[in-house]
Amino acid sequence: MSDTRHTKVLIIGSGPAGYTAGVYAARAMLEPLLVQGIEPGGQLTTTTEVENWPGDSEVQGPDLMIRMEAHARAMGCDIVGDIITSLDLSKRPFTAQSDSGTVYTADAVIMCTGARAKWLGLPTEEKFKGFGVSACATCDGFFYCGMEIAVIGGGNTAVEEALFLTNFASKVTLIHRRDELRCEKILEHRLLKNPKIETLWFHELEEVYGTDSPLGVEGIKVKHTKTGEITDLPVKGVFIAIGHAPASELVKDQLDLHSGGYVAVDAGSTRTAIPGVFAAGDLTDHTYRQAVTSAGMGCMAALDAEKFLAEQE
Ligand code: FAD
Ligand code: NAP
């Protein structure tokens, strides 16, 4: 028989938005319950140094998230290691089914499911995923000690990953489809002066190739975006860093979405189209997508939920 747990506020997601919502909702005496999901701590657990979190000129992403979790717990937020598999927002209390079998019911829901890495969608990228193709340098960089690797993308993530990977790799080639990066200037400066990094502009990944038994990458073919010329690079690892897509699967048929999947909220608030359902962080924000803005929206969502619940009483 499945266990049912009722809470006034169910927070789904454990990134900066979720934990901050947990801190504020707990301090509002709402006894929130937070479900962490498959990635406890969220995206920042996949990076190393974070240099733009106010109050810390440098902090490791995973350490920051451990501190946020401890903070939310200390304030009284109930934090559960579980994954929400479906959500029914058609009537109150809202109902969430989970991977563990527990059914969560809630008077208000704060959605903080963030975003997930995007893939290029090439068959050979899929074939070697986990065997030379990765989307997480901090998770997999260590496997490439002394080897040549490639990073695909031109944003903050790609540049940070390329820089981080120089700790292991003999050479890193950053492959970008344009000749202009969209990362912060300080990162661009570090990238361009790093002797282990080479940039390949106007190129896209065409194919990953390697051995079948054992499965492993031996190289990639990249195509010039203007001339179509194919170049072969003998790399052992490829890191795809082309951005993130919002994790809106749970609500895509129930809430209004914008800009290709981000949950729409009323301007200046975290209220969604359904009263009692709030959204915060990268799930709703296609513009800023930062830890500090996500945390700020988590705070707003808890305050919006508090106001909503007070109005119901
Ligand atoms: P996320 O951090 O994406 O967390 C989403 C959470 O939702 C996860 O805990 C996940 O487990 C949970 N979840 C998802 N689906 C479910 C489900 N079905 N059930 C339950 N839980 C679920 N920002 C900065 O400000 N500074 C940086 O230096 C920086 N570096 C970055 C480096 C990298 C490599 C990446 C990828 C991002 C970086 N960012 C940085 C961006 C920052 O990490 C994000 O803006 C921030 O983490 C978004 O927070 P969030 O709470 O909205 O969601
Ligand atoms: P992003 O900013 O969206 O950049 C994605 C990059 O991948 C772009 O350069 C894009 O090229 C390229 N790209 C996208 N699709 C592609 C495709 N199909 N083929 C080839 N290239 C493709 O994503 P991100 O770097 O993951 O950053 C996401 C958010 O997190 C941003 O808001 C970022 O600021 C934040 N973040 C912040 C930090 C930090 O503050 N230090 C660190 C990491 C991430 P084009 O440029 O041509 O579009």
Image (cartoon, helix red, strand yellow):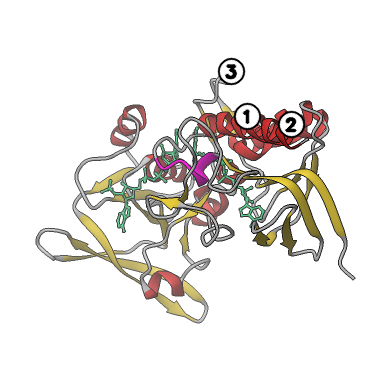
Asked if residue 209 shows in the view, the reply is: no
Say above or below: 199 vs 72: below
Residue at the spot of label 3: 55
Mark 2 to mark 3: distance in Å?
33 Å
Drawn side of residue 212 relative to residue 172, left or right: right
Residue at the spot of label 1: 299
Marks 2 and 3, the one that precedes in the sequence = 3
The amino acid beneath tag 1 is Cys
- Judging depth in this view, the residue of 58 and 247 nearest the camera is 247
Q: Residues within 10 Å of mark 1 (few under 14, many from 20)?
A: many
Marks 1 and 3, the one that precedes in the sequence = 3
Secondary structure beneath dot 1 equals: helix
Drawn side of residue 40 relative to residue 164, left or right: right
Among all residues in the image, which is located at the extreme left? 227
Which residue is depicted at the point 71% across and 33% down? 311
Q: Ligand 1 lies in which image quarter? A: top right
Percent coordinates x, y for residue 205 in the rendering: 29, 63
The part of the image, by quadrant, that contains residue 57 is top right
Q: Residues within 10 Å of mark 2 (few under 14, many from 20)?
A: few
Secondary structure beneath dot 2 equals: helix
Marks 2 and 1, the one that precedes in the sequence = 1
- Is residue 282 found inside the magenta-colored segment of the image? yes
Say above or below: 18 vs 221: above
The amino acid beneath tag 2 is Ala
Percent coordinates x, y for residue 87 in the rendering: 66, 60
Secondary structure beneath dot 3 equals: loop
Mark 1 to mark 3: distance in Å?
18 Å
The part of the image, by quadrant, that contains residue 11 is top right
What number is the disc on residue 310?
A: 2
Asked if residue 77 shows in the view, the reply is: yes
Which residue is depicted at the point 47% across and 65% down? 132
Q: Which residues are magenta?
A: 281-286
